[in-house]
Image (cartoon, rainbow, N blue to C red):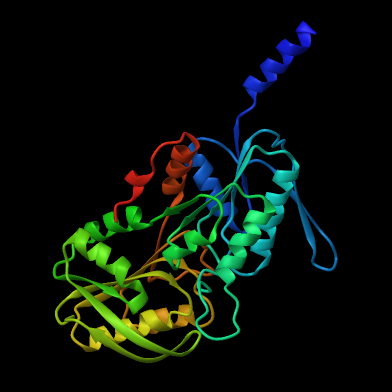
Amino acid sequence: MTTFVNKYKKNKMQDSPIIFFSGTATEYLSKKIVKAYGSKLGKTTIAHFSDGEFQPSYDDTVRGKTVFIIQSTFQPTDNLMELLLLIDAAKRASAYKIVAVMPYFGFARQDRKDKPRVAIGAKLVADLLYTAGVSRVMTMDLHADQIQGFFNVPVDHIYASSIFVPYIKNLGLDDLVIASPDMGGTKRANAYSKFLKTPMVICHKSREKANVIGEMTVIGEVKNKNVIILDDMIDTAGTITKAADMMMAKGAKSVRAIATHGVLSGPAYERLKNSDIKEIIISDSIPLKKKCDKITVLSVANVFADTINKVYNYESISSNFIV
């Protein structure tokens, strides 16, 4: 009996109480996060059936451990489904806690009923994660802050300002102006403009339908200014490029765009290439589909590694918020 107890204690000391896993789509970022944290990724295996169905499983034990699963849920929807299955597998394998680290939270644009008979996709995803067994969610620059309230578990909402603000300062631009591409982004743009002590302008747009811009006007002065347009994501790049071209036509010196999530679907790359935007700065929350000379990618790995460390050790993460 004594021998068994001593052996059990020795094994418990050898085991790490925290373990990291990555979804298939975000392995490129997961490796950087765990390296910055000073750990390594656990191993998973995904079995594929001929009809497209898949079944992930853990090759390492998760019993009694705090499991961090890193996966951005950009398209295809399989990325979300894989995350849900990994959460369920960890729960059924007796993990102590399960934290979903979602650098990009997909379906966030469906945060309300903007017309009759539509789903609120962001709330549905929050419910799915909770039902699967998640204990906590960690994400970055949600499309709408109120999505945090859709969850029944704690949400650590991280801001990419900690990597973007130093980059803006290093540009050393005179006559800097911060711009919001639409009315919904004014809060974010205002926070940056206050912190950087620069003026702010707003683009007012109307949409004919999803991803299609109707009319657009600029509220504020951009003549002889170096403009930086801030947004949470760039999808088809219609808004960003139209705003940039309009500002250059109104006499701006230069226009740059900063967005946390480079969704970049459809005609995005072609639009950015042919636009008056001098530079597009994005994070690596979503991998680039192809290279573009105008795009600069900044990594959020250190930000997530530091936040994970603080959350796991019950420390405040507010020091990570520059803006």
Residue positioned 78% across, 12% down in the render: 4
Image position of 310 with respect to 138: above or below = above
Q: Is residue 152 visible?
A: yes
Foreground pick, 293 / 268: 268
Q: Residue at x 17, y 76 (%)?
A: 225
Q: Does residue 24 show up?
A: no
Rendering coords of residue 272 (x, y %): 41, 79
Position of 236 with respect to 93 (left or right) is left
| 100 up-or-down from 67: above or below | below
Identify the residue shown where x is 21% and y is 58%.
Answer: 195
Task: Name the spot of residue 24 as percent of width and height, x first.
Answer: 65, 56
**Residue 108, position as x, y percentages in the image:** 52, 68
Left of 98 or right of it: where is 276? left
| Quadrant for the N terminus in the image | top right
Considering every residue shown, the one lying at the far top of the view is 2
User: Where 201 sits versus 135, above or below?
Assistant: below
208 is higher (above) or lower (below) than 268:
below
Q: Which quadrant of the structure image shows residue 8?
A: top right
Q: Is residue 200 left or right of residue 185?
A: left
